[in-house]
Amino acid sequence: MFQFDSEALDERQADYIMRRPPSRILASMIGFSLIITILAACGAGTSPASTGNSNGNGGTQQTITIKIGSELPTTSGDASTGKPAQDGVELAVKEANDSNFLPGYKFELVAKDDVGANGTHDATVGQKNVTDLIGDAQVAGIVGPINSSVALAEIPTTNKAPIALISPSNTNDCLTKETPAFECGGANSKLAALRPSGKVTYFRTATIDQYQGAALAVYAYKNKNYRTAYVIDDTEAYGVGLAKNFTTYWQKLGGKILGSASIKQTNSYENILTAIAAKKPDFIMFGGNDSTGGITIRQQMKSVAGLGNTPFLAGDGSKTSALAKAVKPLGGGPVFASIPGIDPSQSPASKAFFDAYTKQFGAGAIGAYSAGGYDCAKILLQAIKTAVQDKKAQAPKNSNDDSGASSFRQAVIDGVQNVQYDGVTGHHSFDKNGDTSNHFVSLYTIGDLNTGDGWKYLEQIDTSTLQ
């Protein structure tokens, strides 16, 4: 049997080299170096800019990047609403990468802020943001926006692309429906403008204002035994819609509306509040955001004679840590607000989520839509996984792969439309309009400012049972 003697071979090689002319030795060394250089460049099978993972067979497979966009108001006056939602999206993306959720792929968050020069959400900024996100072929879907007025500007753009847009908080009925007729029917219908393609590409995990308005009315009438209300809205799509739906159901229950006013955000509401005080309502209902009147109205109620102890009722746009911190030290009447969905603390998945969230961002960072942003991102990630594994859709090769983006984004839209998802905010599936099947609404009052976002959970109402 042949035996390989490495020492003998090394001696023969050395003797051979020493007996060769110096010029031949130099040529051999140069040739050998060139071969080594070529092998080093080709052997790995990757370019310097590429990344790879072992494929288990001694080779490598390229890691493909898929991007998740977020389009939320994360600074200035809306930071207490939008930034926690973005944090939720960021946590979902991080967990997907840490768990190797989709082998061979990595996920990247591309975050946009729609706060404009006025210090609050701006529809023009939002539309530009989604246009920029659509321009990056690797963005597979977008979480957002927070505000229905911004959604009105963004949905036609994302529908034409097409790309999935999924909101944790939009509640205006007319974004997806022509009902209720008094709000969204006939000439008020926006569906043709919002869906130029004729197809649904917009989804939301928040239930709509006809349910949220009804739940607020039920809580005020049946739980608190109030009978008279004065209603103010901020003139925006969300605020007007919520106020209208509250008023309709309130009157259906037998409650009385003493008056109403639509007022754009201003520094002083004292004139209207003085007029309201003369009517002596059981409470004031506000349709709008903390940044578009919620904080200022409640602050100034305390200084108007006759309203110092009057209850204040609002929707999810005012359930923020900013409002809680601004008004609790003032004392006065109770403050109630709602979230159009299941309270995250009531979910079996809540402990794991809150533990991970507070570890990443701190206990003080939690907001009304931290869990909503997280669940929207999780739904997009699940749809992407379905597109890749079940539909064999090919993710775009790079940010300029427009043809690849078109087919992949449609596969993701299909995945969202058919999803069955159990998350921190409950179970979500979507109807033909893109609305969630989850019709719960949760009620809160201001609680311990050092706990969560400063709001105390009271109860939830299953609005599917309301007539």
Image: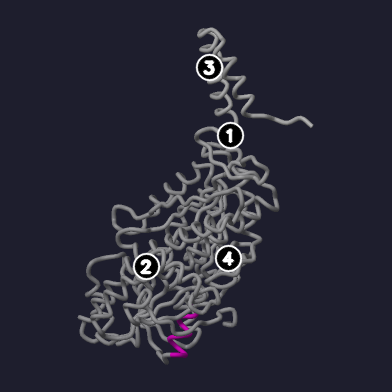
State which tag comes first along the sequence, 1 or 2: 1
How crowded pointer 1 is (Cα within 10 Å; few <14, some 14-19, many 20+) is rated as: few
Quadrant for residue 238, please give it.
bottom left
* Residue 156 image position (x, y, % from top left): 52, 51
Find disc 4 in the rendering and name its residue. Answer: 435
Q: Residue at x 29, y 52 (%)?
A: 117
Q: Amino acid at mark 4?
A: Asp
Residue 203, placed above or below residue 16 = below
Q: Secondary structure at mark 3?
A: helix
Q: Is residue 451 visible?
A: yes
Q: CA distance from mark 4 to mark 1?
A: 49 Å
Between circles 1 and 3, the one closer to the viewer is 3
Question: Does the magenta portion include 384?
Answer: no
Find disc 1 in the rendering and name its residue. Answer: 44
Q: Residue at x 63, y 65 (%)?
A: 431
Q: Secondary structure at mark 2?
A: loop
Q: CA distance from mark 1 to mark 3?
A: 23 Å
Q: CA distance from mark 1 to mark 2?
A: 42 Å
Q: Which mark is residue 362?
A: 2
Q: Which mark is residue 433?
A: none
Q: If the image is split into quadrants, where does the C terminus sit?
A: bottom right
Between circles 3 and 4, the one closer to the viewer is 3
Q: Amino acid at mark 1?
A: Ala
State which tag comes first along the sequence, 3 or 4: 3
Q: Secondary structure at mark 1?
A: loop
Find disc 3 in the rendering and name its residue. Answer: 29
Q: Amino acid at mark 3?
A: Met
Range shown magenta: 214-223
How crowded pointer 2 is (Cα within 10 Å; few <14, some 14-19, many 20+) is rated as: few
User: Foreground residue, 379 or 196?
Assistant: 379
Q: Amino acid at mark 2?
A: Gly
Quadrant for residue 241, please give it.
bottom left
